[in-house]
Amino acid sequence: MKKTILFLCLFTLFPKVSLGSGEFTLSFTQTSGNSGTNTLAVSYQLNRELSRWKFSSRGDYLYKEDDGEETSNKLNLEGTVGRKFKDKFFLEFYGFIFRDPFSGYDFRGGLGPGLSWRISENLTVSGSFTYTYNNYSAGESSTYSQAELKGNYFKKLTSSLLFEQSLSYQVSFKDKDDYFLHSRTTFKVPFGSNLSLNLSYRVDYQNLLPDDAEYHTDRTFLLGVSYSF
């Protein structure tokens, strides 16, 4: 229920118009035998442009069990409202919500201004400054300002193969050693008019670990199906 409320809160960033273009992806894997694992991953992406305005939102949720024990429960949501002020440039207001108790965060959230540059039809880069709040799984909390740089690239390699790559870097102004790196690499094979088979590899790195976190890097390999609209 709490996750549903978070999704609904993020969608309030959008005006009451049609959603525009978007994508919904579902991945599920299950193994049995010497070890039993269940992995569920859900992600979405929405984009809408109205005259000089741009609205976008994306998010993903990952849940994993190993032999009946929960080993991953990660939620990430982002929303952006932008206005074009010059050809290919947008002034933006950006917000994010992140939750991953296994990485030491019961909640991370931030809001702030940004700027994006649509370099080409295939490549967009952006930067933002956010006021960020962290609620750690160990019980403490902190607030600080951070900068974030992002890049998104896609290319149609063949008539039946699409490549997508996204990178982001977040760093605290309070401590330059407190930074995060995120990478998403995806290959898509369309089948039918709106469906595609997705092969994705995700890497999430945090340089400073909260007290109850053990690993700096999370790596996730997923095979799923996407529906585009």
Image (spheres, grey):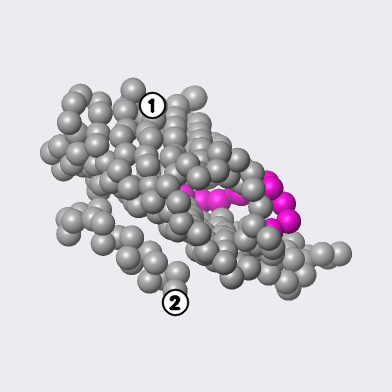
Left or right: where 178 falls relative to 32: left
Asked if the residues shown at circle 1 and circle 2 are in contact, with their CB atoms under 8 angstroms apart, the answer is no
Relative image position of residue 77 (x, y in whole percent): 43, 55
Position above or below: 88 against 77: above
Choose top left, top right, bottom left or bottom right for residue 199.
top right
Q: Is residue 225 magenta?
A: yes
- Residue 85 falls in image quadrant: top left
Q: Secondary structure at mark 2?
A: loop
Give coordinates of residue 227: x percent, y percent: 41, 51
Kindly tell me whether residue 118 is visible in this rendering: yes
Q: Is residue 140 left or right of residue 144?
A: right
The amino acid type found where label 1 is placed reads Asn
The location of residue 134, given as percent across then percent down, is 50, 59
Q: Is residue 183 above or below residue 27?
A: above
- Tell me what residue is drawn at x 68 percent, y 60 percent: 211
One can see residue 58 in this view: no
For the residues marked 1 and 2, what is the alpha-carbon distance in whole angstroms? 37 Å
| Residue beneath disc 1 | 122
Residue at the extreme front: 174
Label 2, residues with CA under 10 Å away: few <14, some 14-19, many ≥20: few
Residue 205 in percent (x, y) is at 62, 44
Residue 1 badge: 2
Segment colored magenta: 213-227
* Overall secondary structure of the magenta section: strand
